[in-house]
């Protein structure tokens, strides 16, 4: 149950992080130039919009990392061990070994291995 909540939060934060990164333009354009223009103070201006997008990218990335690490704790491990049975020395196999196939015989009653030697 808790893992499902973490998973939903991870998806939402990852989507928000994608949106914030896609809105930014490394050459000075993007959302900041659309709202700010040539230094006007419309919606906070270019510098404040760029600072907001930069800070929100770091906050969302940090929050995503914390959610991923916290979800590892919330995973229901259950009562069964997920370890391999090959590593357990007390584990026994109950499957019998198959019977060996008979060797083909030659006409004189010897096996193929006897004639090859």
Image (cartoon, grey):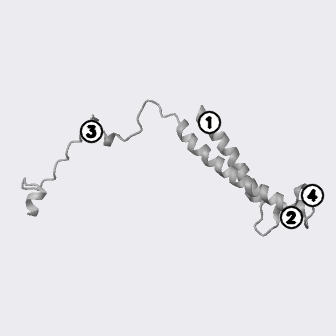
Q: Residues within 10 Å of mark 3 (few under 14, many from 20)?
A: few
Identify the image quadrant of residue 30.
bottom right
> Which of marks 4 and 3 precedes in the sequence?
4
Give me the C-alpha separation between circle 3 and circle 4: 71 Å
Q: Nearer the viewer, residue 18 or 103?
A: 18
Query: Residue at label 2?
Result: 33
Residue ranking furthest to the top? 79
Residue closer to the observer: 83 or 63: 63
Is residue 37 found left or right of 73 in the rendered image?
right
Residue 66 shows in the view: yes
Which residue corresponds to mark 1? 4
Find numbered disc 2 in the image and state the secondary structure of the residue it sits on: helix
Label 4 element class: helix
**In the picture, which quadrant includes the C terminus?**
bottom left
Foreground: disc 1 or disc 4: 4
Q: Is mark 3 on a helix, strand or loop?
A: loop
Q: Which of marks 2 and 1 is in front?
A: 2
Q: Earlier in the sequence, mark 2 or mark 4?
A: 2
Which part of the image, by quadrant, shows the N terminus? Answer: top right
Disc number placed over residue 42 in the picture, else none: 4
> How crowded is the residue under tag 1: few (<14 C-alpha within 10 Å), some, or many (20+)?
few
Mark on residue 89? Answer: 3
Cα–Cα span, label 2 and label 3: 66 Å
Q: How far apart are marks 1 and 3 (CA)?
A: 35 Å
Label 2: how many Cα within 10 Å (few below 14, some 14–19, many 20+): some
Residue depth check, mark 3 versus mark 4: number of the one nearer the observer: 4
Q: Earlier in the sequence, mark 2 or mark 3?
A: 2
Task: Return the x and y of residue 70 as percentages of the image width and height.
Answer: 57, 41
């Amino acid at each position: 149950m808790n893992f499902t909540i973490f998973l939903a939060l991870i998806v939402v934060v990852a989507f928000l992080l994608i949106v914030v990164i896609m809105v930014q333009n490394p050459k000075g354009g993007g959302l900041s130039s659309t709202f700010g223009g040539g230094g006007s103070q419309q919606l906070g201006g270019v510098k404040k919009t760029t600072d907001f997008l930069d800070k929100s990218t770091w906050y969302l990335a940090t929050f995503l990392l914390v959610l991923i690490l916290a979800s590892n704790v919330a995973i229901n491990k259950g009562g069964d061990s997920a370890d391999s049975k090959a590593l357990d020395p007390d584990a026994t196999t109950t499957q019998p070994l198959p019977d060996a196939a008979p060797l083909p015989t030659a006409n004189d009653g010897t096996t193929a291995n006897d004639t090859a030697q």
